[in-house]
Amino acid sequence: MFLDKIVLLNFKNHENRTVNFQKKINCIIGNNGMGKTNLLDAIYYLCLTKSYFNSTDQQNILFDRDFFRLEGKLHKEGHPFDIVYKLASNKRKELIVNDSPLPRLSEHIGHFPAIIISPDDSLLITGNSDERRRFLDNTISQVNHEYLDRLISYNKVLAQRNASLKRFAETRHVDRSLIETYDQQLIGLGNQIYEARKVVMGKLYPLFQKFYKQLSFEREGVSFTYNSQLNETPFNELLARNFDRDIMLQRTDAGIHKDDIEFSLSSAGNNTPVKIKRFGSQGQQKSFIISIKFAQYEFIRQSKTFKPFLLIDDIFDKLDNDRSQKLVELIAGDEFGQVFLTDTDDAHIKEVLNGKEALFEIINI
């Protein structure tokens, strides 16, 4: 799978830009504020139907304009694809693949998988549990469409249950039969989501450790733990036990929407793991993030018959020279397909390439 060309119209700070790519590694070079990250986000949009950086689509329209349009020319498994994404102010977004509009954007997820690594990913370590669940859900949704459908349904039922709990608190009238209806739906969907998460976390673990060992030259070890209330207690018991508390809080306080991942680090001379959030250096945390994202990439690659896109924003941020060179060596290898990366300095890129210049296309913006 590869992207030949992308056209951006009124997207963020790009009024009208066309960029052509080569099939392996594309280095997007430019000063800060020139739109390098926005170009990566446009690629992500075409693959995942949303921005990686802005949760509100309207924020991605160029200032003083009333629409944006993205178009990508892709090839996958020998077949051409023309993907158009359009959004006008106060209108629904529209996705068109080979001249056919998709009725549901979620149908597109997984057909053109993409993994992005950004300085903002530090929140995966330092942020709240929402960030880590989002990472896990993104991983599974790109290989399992049933999982995505179940997750969407779970969140809808959860919102309905929470709205009812708030109404009960306001009216002081509790409709237990309504809650039982919601609970049965949550239990069925939640158990399936929980089992899928457990399986995928088990598959990500050895891949994650492999990549971190390579990036850190085995100077330290890493691990993660999948924490879920369902690890210890069946979902139906959790909901029943927490019902009175839910009424008081006016929200559902138990379930897979509370799942989290705990990341740990251990040094070569001390096997006792510590939380990387508290004790990891900036370089260790960046290596950690790259490794978990590479594990995500490899898991998706093994689930497909083609290689996903890899997008890396500010590629050498917080990495020393040894880790930077190892990173370049990895992405230039056969495990990775088409890669898009940004940096402010092409001289830095060329210094780290170490004789691999033929694999790279320098794109100045």
Image (cartoon, helix red, strand yellow):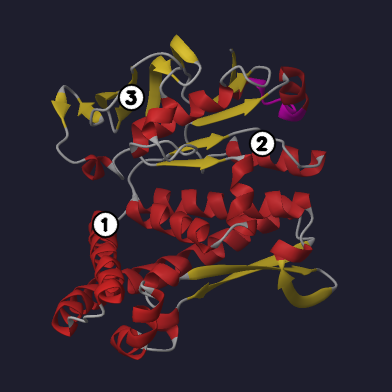
Label 2: element kind: helix
For the residues labelled 2 and 1, the Cα–Cα distance comes to 37 Å
Q: Is residue 264 left or right of residue 190?
A: right
Label disc, if present, on residue 134 of the rendered structure = none
Residue 321 versus residue 28: which sits nearer the camera?
28
Frontmost of labels 2 and 3 is 3
Give the residues drawn in magenta, as a range. Answer: 352-357
Q: Are marks 2 and 3 in contact (CB under 8 Å)?
A: no
Q: Amino acid at mark 2?
A: Val
**Disc with the residue nearer the chain's start (3 vs 1):** 3
Name the residue beneath numbered marker 2.
328
For the residues labelled 2 and 3, the Cα–Cα distance comes to 24 Å
- Would you call the spot at circle 3 few (<14 residues within 10 Å), some (14-19), or many (20 or more)? some
Label disc, if present, on residue 74 of the rendered structure = 3
Name the residue beneath numbered marker 1.
152
**Disc with the residue nearer the chain's start (2 vs 3):** 3
Label 3: element kind: strand
Label 1: element kind: helix
Q: Amino acid at mark 3?
A: Leu
Q: Is residue 352 left or right of residue 80?
A: right
In the rendered image, the quadrant that contains the N terminus is top left
Say above or below: 138 vs 101.
Answer: below
Please tell me which residue is depicted at 14% across the width and 37% down the height of the picture. Answer: 103
Number of marks drawn:
3
Q: Amino acid at mark 1?
A: Ile
